[in-house]
Image (cartoon, helix red, strand yellow):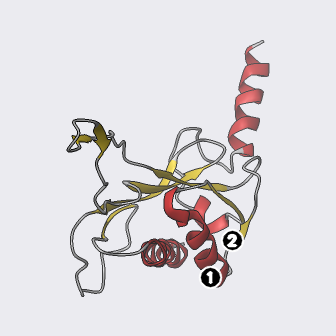
Amino acid sequence: MLPFVLALMLGWIQAAGGQVAGAPSSNKLVSAKLVYVEPMPFDLDKWIIDDLRAWNRFRQTANSEGVDILIRAKAPERDTRFKLSRQGVPQPKRERNELPVESIVVLDWVTGARLFQADLVNQKPKDDSGPPASEHIFLNVRGMKPDQIAQKFVTQFRLYVEHLQSAR
């Protein structure tokens, strides 16, 4: 029985590409071909798909089953606030211009591991060259439209993937 279990575990490790299960696989971004972008508020997903198409690195699909990586956004929870009208009837307040999402995350579809994350910060964009290529970044996006946010996200994601390719 013990040789069977050892052979099974050895086959499982070899099937995982020689990596132990649970170990982070940053090279998944380098080898990925198929990507699914989940629906996002303010059509941010459509802008991200357009920018990924322009990059021509990944193939997009409309079905999330069996993809290599998954791009998901976490939308902020908004409570409806009310104000009293002149007649004393509660009316919903107008929403201020807030960020469409809190963060955009790239996940490994199989393991659910986070491969890249960009947190959106409600601060004015700076004119510097941007943050260094890392797995977790902060993007200053105050006053930006969804297409500009998507372009900034894909640019930083591209820098990170190219950094991983050069480190190989």
Task: Looking at this view, name the residue that lies furthest to the front.
Answer: 87
Q: Image check: 115 left or right of 68?
A: left
> Percent x, y for residue 30?
61, 68
Element under disc 1: helix
The answer to whether residue 145 is above or below residue 69 is below
Q: Image check: 167 left or right of 53?
A: left
> Percent x, y for residue 13?
68, 40
Q: Are marks 2 and 1 in contact (CB under 8 Å)?
A: yes
Q: Quadrant of residue 53?
A: bottom right
Mark 2: few/some/many CA within 10 Å (<14, 14-19, 20+): some
Residue highlighted by disc 2: 58
Of 42 and 71, nearer the camera is: 42
Residue highlighted by disc 1: 55
Q: Image check: 29 left or right of 122?
A: right
- The residue under the point 76% across, 37% down is 11
Identify which amino acid the numbered label 1 is placed on.
Trp
Q: Quadrant of residue 140?
A: bottom left
Identify which amino acid the numbered label 2 is placed on.
Phe
Element under disc 2: loop
Of 167 and 88, nearer the camera is: 88
> Percent x, y for residue 75?
43, 49
